[in-house]
Amino acid sequence: MANFNTHLSVAIAASAGVALVAVNINIMTITDAPWMIVFGAIGGMLPDIDSGNSTPIKLFFTTLALIALLTVVNVFKNGYQPYIVLLMAGAAYIVVRYALLSLFDRFTSHRGIFHSILTATFFCLLMVCIGCYLLHWDILHSWLSGFFIGFGFIVHLLLDELYSVDLSNKRMKKSFGTALKLYSYNNKITSALMLAVTVGLAWITPQPQPLIKAWQAQAIPHLLAVKSIITAPIVKKTNQK
Ligand SMILES: [Zn+2]
């Protein structure tokens, strides 16, 4: 199994490659690239939040707890005494960071639903919604960040599968096929729940039209230009014959 550092470095390298191409074909600007690489790296760590006491799960729940803390402060800051707001914020942090984490740990198994394309789709759409509705980014950037989260996620699953092929003995390890799967075949109930939540998210996610438009307006002419440069000598040769 690939460790945390391997997953992180591969996700960063792969996202940097895709970001470079996206900048080159004018889908995004060079200043967007570092952010998108960060999203790719986050996506690359997300699948392992199901493995007990792993670093990603702790990071994930600490982030969630901080979001909960800030939300409580923002919602209640005008209606209550500061010390009460602080107490409530502290309680929210502890509930999310410790109680929710141990609950989550109880109901998930490693390489269960979190190692699946369904969950990659869920996190992609979740990021689009967070970008669009919470952070008020434009739809193009919300979709780009969602895409990079999903991309990093899939890279992680592929890497896990790659590590389950024992090249020296030319055989498959037991873990083969447990990472890159459509949904959790062993746990139909969590799969059904994840599907329901993902469909719900898809319902409220804004259409990716700006991303498709950017692709059609920028990428396709660019790719055609590259194609004509490559095929020009061949066409010339056949004309000369
Ligand atoms: Zn994994």
Image (spheres, rainbow, N blue to C red):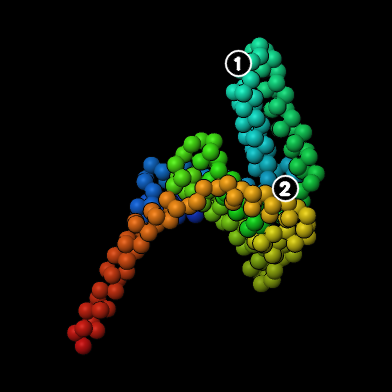
Residue 168: image quadrant is: bottom right
Numbered label attached to residue 78: 1
Looking at this view, is 103 or 4 the one in front? 103
Three-letter code for the amino acid on which mark 1 is drawn: Asn
Q: Secondary structure at mark 1?
A: loop
Q: Is residue 165 left or right of residue 19?
A: right
Residue 60: percent from left, percent from top: 64, 39
Residue most extreme to the bottom: 241
Residue 148 visible (yes or no)? no
Q: Residues within 10 Å of mark 1 (few under 14, many from 20)?
A: few
Residue 192: image quadrant is: bottom right
Q: Is residue 207 left or right of residue 177?
A: left
Q: Earlier in the sequence, mark 1 or mark 2?
A: 2
**Residue drawn at point x = 78 percent, y = 55 percent:** 189
Marks 1/2: CA distance? 40 Å
**Residue drawn at point x = 69 percent, y = 65 percent:** 177
Per the image, the residue denoted by label 2 is 51
Q: Secondary structure at mark 2?
A: loop
**Residue drawn at point x = 64 percent, y = 15 percent:** 79
Residue 190 visible (yes or no)? yes
Q: Residues within 10 Å of mark 2 (few under 14, many from 20)?
A: some
Quadrant for the C terminus in the image = bottom left
Find out if the beta carbon at label 2 lies less than 8 Å from the nearest ligand 1 atom. yes
Residue 119: percent from left, percent from top: 65, 53
Three-letter code for the amino acid on which mark 2 is drawn: Ser
Looking at this view, is 55 or 236 the one in front? 236
Residue 73: percent from left, percent from top: 62, 22
